[in-house]
Amino acid sequence: MKSITIKGSERESVGKVATKALRNAGAVPCVLYGGDQPVHFSAEEKAFKNLVYTPNAHTVVIDLGNGKSFNAILQDIQVHPVSDRILHIDFFQLFDNKEITIEVPVKIIGNSKGVMAGGDLRINNRKLKVKALPKNLPDFVEADITPLDMGNKLYVTKVPTPNFKIMHPDNTVICQVKMSRAAMKAAQEAAKAAKAPAKGKKK
């Protein structure tokens, strides 16, 4: 999985006054959990642009200077309900020997037989939760829709998971091919034509 580096600095004061001052200065207060004790730090709001405003999943290197850096993932984010400004971010520390669960996007590949025949591709889950060691976390889950015919569904059990586990029930549908209105209408007309008596023949 791709990684983004966030350069920040540790916070000595974590009270409301200090937090408000940080936000007024264009910084975001953050907390890193998962280690021996929480690490409070802050970074410029623009530093989170490529982490927050993207559909992709990333791990994070939190660089606090003086040789202090941590590998982490974004755990929770709070944004202002009106301005959408980032108010606070929680991170969770990663360790090489501990598995972690994270949500990653689904990447659709291939050409479905059903879609080429006039069906509609419906994506039920655009993101899936996966569990793996940090080094094995995928950028995305690849879903090949090539075998899907009209009316078929692609379940999570049908996608390759070489070094990670998908944390969803086996009956979870990633996507399906449904008959479109145009295809349904054509099928109905074809059925009617097949039932209608041929011209010139007596009933």
Image (cartoon, helix red, strand yellow):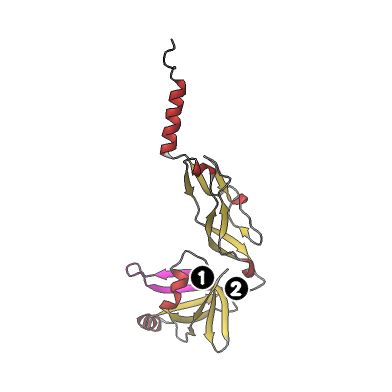
Please tell me which of labels 1 and 2 falls first in the chain: 1
Image location (x, y in percent) of residue 64: 52, 84
**Segment tinted magenta in the rendering:** 75-95
Tag shown at residue 94:
2
Image location (x, y in percent) of residue 161: 64, 57
Q: Amino acid at mark 1?
A: Leu
Look at the image and tell me in which quarter the C terminus lies. top left
Tag shown at residue 148:
none
Q: Amino acid at mark 2?
A: Leu
Image location (x, y in percent) of residue 77: 45, 69
Which secondary structure, mark 2?
Answer: loop
- Give the residue furthest to the top: 202
How crowded pointer 2 is (Cα within 10 Å; few <14, some 14-19, many 20+) is rated as many
Residue corresponding to mark 1: 74
- Give the residue furthest to the bottom: 66
Q: Residue at x 33, y 70 (%)?
A: 83
Q: CA distance from mark 1 to mark 2?
A: 11 Å
* Nearer to us in this view, 107 or 6: 107
Residue 84 falls within the magenta-colored stretch: yes
Main secondary structure of the magenta stretch: strand
Q: Quadrant of residue 182?
A: top left
Q: Residue at x 45, y 85 (%)?
A: 13
Look at the image and tell me in which quarter the N terminus lies. bottom right
